[in-house]
Amino acid sequence: QLNTFLTNISNVPMNFRDVSDVRSILQDQTQVYHNLQNYSQQINELVTRGQEIMKLPLVPKYVQHDVQNTQKVYNDKIQSAEELLEKLKRLLELWERFDGNKRRYQQQAERLHNEVSLLSSNRNSITSFQNEIDSCQDLRNSYAELKPLVDETGQTLQIISSNNLLPYANLQTLKTDYDNMQEDFFEKLRITEEILQDLISDNQKWIQ
């Protein structure tokens, strides 16, 4: 019965679509680990009983072999289950951080983009260039302040990659998300800087 249990129990497959799948798989893998832990006492009793039997005369060698084999299979199974459990916990922590950073970036970048668009559309009706220049400089600085968030997202992705926490396809999806974030950041920073330089140039012409 014990051998049948050990043969049938296995780690949860690592099939992900998104971070919610990781949460679900983590729950399932936790149950696998707990199921194995519940058999710890039976394994210990089996080993103890086997050692007692081996002290008796004329005991076949296969008895010791069977006991040792069962113990090894159990130890390998529970070690593997625990390692995967820890891997999933780490992956969940990192993926949630990655997604959280991505959401925060999108929200802040969208807000700043709307302000830049408004500033750009008002350029033809500007009455006080210096106020607009100051506003644009503030926006440019606000965009620049998003860089640590972009950098942290890249570092999180690097940790996931270097520790082989995700299958290749999932990793490529996150990499694409990060590449898009980087591209968006540098493009919007460039546009804001361009508007600022145009305002400064127009202001100088106005003064002259």
Image (cartoon, rainbow, N blue to C red):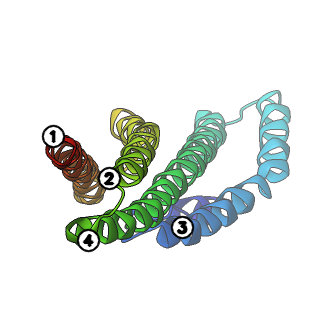
Label 2, secondary structure: give it. helix
Above or below, 187 against 15 in this view is: above
Percent across and percent down for residue 99 are 47, 60
Measured in 3D between alpha carbons, the distance from the residue under mark 2 to the one under mark 3, in whole angstroms, is 57 Å
Measured in 3D between alpha carbons, the distance from the residue under mark 3 to the one under mark 1, in whole angstroms, is 68 Å
- Residue 170 visible in the current orientation: yes
Q: Residues within 10 Å of mark 2 (few under 14, many from 20)?
A: some
Measured in 3D between alpha carbons, the distance from the residue under mark 4 to the one under mark 1, in whole angstroms, is 19 Å
Q: Is residue 136 left or right of residue 83?
A: left
Looking at the image, tell me whether mark 3 or mark 1 is earlier in sequence order: 3
Q: Nearer the viewer, residue 117 or 126?
A: 126
Q: Nearer the viewer, residue 54 or 47?
A: 47
Residue marked by disc 3 = 25
Quarter placement of the N terminus: bottom right
Percent across and percent down for residue 125 are 26, 71
Q: Which mark identifies residue 129?
A: 2
Measured in 3D between alpha carbons, the distance from the residue under mark 4 to the one under mark 2, in whole angstroms, is 10 Å
Looking at the image, tell me whether mark 1 or mark 2 is earlier in sequence order: 2
Residue marked by disc 4 = 125
Nearer mark to the viewer, of 1 and 2: 1
Question: At label 3, which amino acid type do we have?
Answer: Ile
Residue marked by disc 1 = 208
